[in-house]
Image (spheres, grey):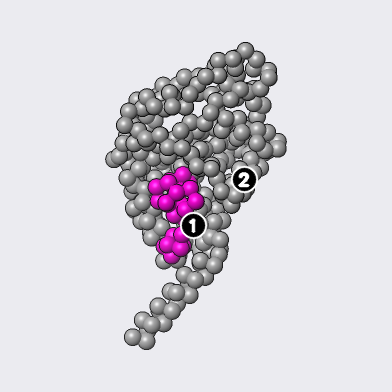
C-alpha cells in the first residue's frame, strides 16, 4: 500500500509539471531526432500514397477567393503579387477519405525551403514541398485536432488537460519540434499515425516510448484517415473578389455565388467557417510569420 501511494503521488507530480508548461517537457527523449522526413520514404513512405483521380479547372485571370487574396497580401512583405495569383478548382471523382472534407483552400507560394501553416480550415505552403507528404499530414492534423478530435475551432483537443495527461504517460515525443507546444506535438503524432494507418505498421520502429500518444491520436482520427467514411459536409467558400484595378473588365462579371458553387454537391452540409477569436488570431499570425521566415520572407 505504501509503495502504491507514493507511486500515485509521483504520477500526480509529473502530470502537474507537464500541465504547467506550454508543451511537452524539454527533457523528453526524441523518437526521430532528425525530424519526420524519414516517414516520407521509410518502407515506401507517405510519398507512396496514391493520388485520387481529380479534374482541375483554372479560373479566369482577374478574380480570386477573398481568403486567398488576404492570405497572399496580409503580411509584410506580401507573399506574392496579387496579379500573379493563379486559382484552380479541384474536383475529386470520389469522396472516400473523410479527412479531405476538413480542408478548404490550399495555397502555394515561392520560398527558399518547404514550410507551411494551417488557418482554421485552410493550408498554405512555401517553397518546394514535393516529396514531403509528412508536412501536408502535419498541417492537416492541425485541422483534425480542431474539428474531429476537438469540439470546435476554439476547443482543439490538444489544448485540453487530457492530452497533456496522455503525454505524461509516455517518455518521449516525435522530435524537437513537438516540444514547442501541445498542438505541434499532436500534429507530429498525427504524421506517425497517418504512416501507421495508411502505409505500414510502426511495429518495426521502436516507438513504445510514445505509444499512448499514438494510440490516442489513432483512436480519434482513424475513421477519417483510412477511407472508411464518406464526406458529408463542405465548407462555405470565400466570396470572390477582384485582384485590383489592373484586372479591369475581367471583374465585370463578378457574379459567382457561394451557394451555387457548393450546393451542387449531393448530401453535403455547407458549413460556414467561423471567425477566429483574438487569441487564436494572434497564435495563427505567429505561425504564419514563422513559416514565412523559414521560407525566406
Residue, x 56% and y 48% (percent of image)?
A: 277
Q: Residue furthest bottom?
A: 2
Question: Which numbered circle lies on residue 144?
Answer: none
Q: Name the residue under label 2.
A: 285
Tell me where residue 199 appears, x and y as whole percent. 36, 42
The residues bearing labels 2 and 1 have C-alpha atoms spaced at a distance of 18 Å
Answer with left or right where residue 84 lies relative to residue 43: right
Query: What range of the chain is rendered magenta?
Result: 142-166
Does the CB distance between marks 2 and 1 fall below 8 Å?
A: no
Quarter of the image with the C terminus is top right
Determine if residue 202 is in view: no
Q: What element carries label 1?
A: helix
Whether residue 150 is situated above or below residue 128 in the rendered picture: below
Tell me where residue 130 appears, x and y as whole percent. 51, 33
Give the crowd class for mark 1: few <14, some 14-19, many >=20 residues within 10 Å: some
Q: Name the residue under label 1.
A: 159
Whether residue 156 is situated above or below residue 265 in the rendered picture: below
Amino acid at each position: 500500500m505504501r509503495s502504491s501511494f507514493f507511486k500515485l503521488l509521483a504520477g500526480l507530480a509529473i502530470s502537474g509539471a507537464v500541465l504547467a508548461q506550454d508543451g511537452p517537457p524539454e527533457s523528453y527523449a526524441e523518437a526521430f531526432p532528425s525530424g519526420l522526413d524519414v516517414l516520407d520514404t521509410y518502407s515506401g513512405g507517405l510519398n507512396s500514397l496514391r493520388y485520387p483521380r481529380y479534374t482541375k479547372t483554372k479560373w479566369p485571370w482577374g478574380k480570386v477567393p477573398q481568403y486567398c487574396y488576404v492570405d497572399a497580401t496580409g503580411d509584410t512583405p506580401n507573399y506574392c503579387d496579387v496579379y500573379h495569383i493563379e486559382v484552380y478548382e479541384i474536383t475529386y471523382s470520389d469522396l472516400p477519405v473523410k479527412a479531405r472534407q476538413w480542408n478548404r483552400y490550399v495555397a502555394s507560394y515561392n520560398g527558399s525551403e518547404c514550410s507551411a501553416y494551417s488557418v482554421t480550415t485552410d493550408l498554405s505552403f512555401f517553397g518546394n514541398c514535393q516529396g514531403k507528404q509528412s508536412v501536408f499530414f502535419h498541417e492537416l492534423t492541425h485541422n483534425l485536432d480542431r474539428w474531429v478530435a476537438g469540439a470546435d475551432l476554439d476547443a482543439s483537443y490538444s489544448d485540453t488537460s487530457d492530452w497533456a495527461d496522455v503525454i505524461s504517460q509516455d517518455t518521449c515525443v516525435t522530435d524537437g519540434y513537438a516540444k514547442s507546444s501541445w498542438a505541434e506535438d499532436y500534429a507530429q503524432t498525427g504524421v506517425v499515425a497517418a504512416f501507421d494507418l495508411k502505409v505500414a505498421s510502426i511495429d518495426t520502429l521502436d516507438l513504445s516510448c510514445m505509444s499512448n500518444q499514438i494510440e490516442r491520436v489513432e483512436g480519434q482520427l482513424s475513421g477519417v484517415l483510412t477511407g472508411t467514411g464518406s464526406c458529408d459536409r463542405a465548407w462555405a467558400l470565400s466570396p470572390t473578389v477582384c485582384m485590383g484595378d489592373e484586372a479591369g473588365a475581367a471583374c465585370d462579371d463578378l457574379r459567382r455565388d457561394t451557394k451555387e458553387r457548393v450546393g451542387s454537391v449531393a448530401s453535403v452540409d455547407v458549413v460556414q467557417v467561423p471567425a477566429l477569436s483574438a487569441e487564436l488570431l494572434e497564435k495563427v499570425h505567429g505561425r504564419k510569420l514563422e513559416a514565412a521566415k523559414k521560407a525566406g520572407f
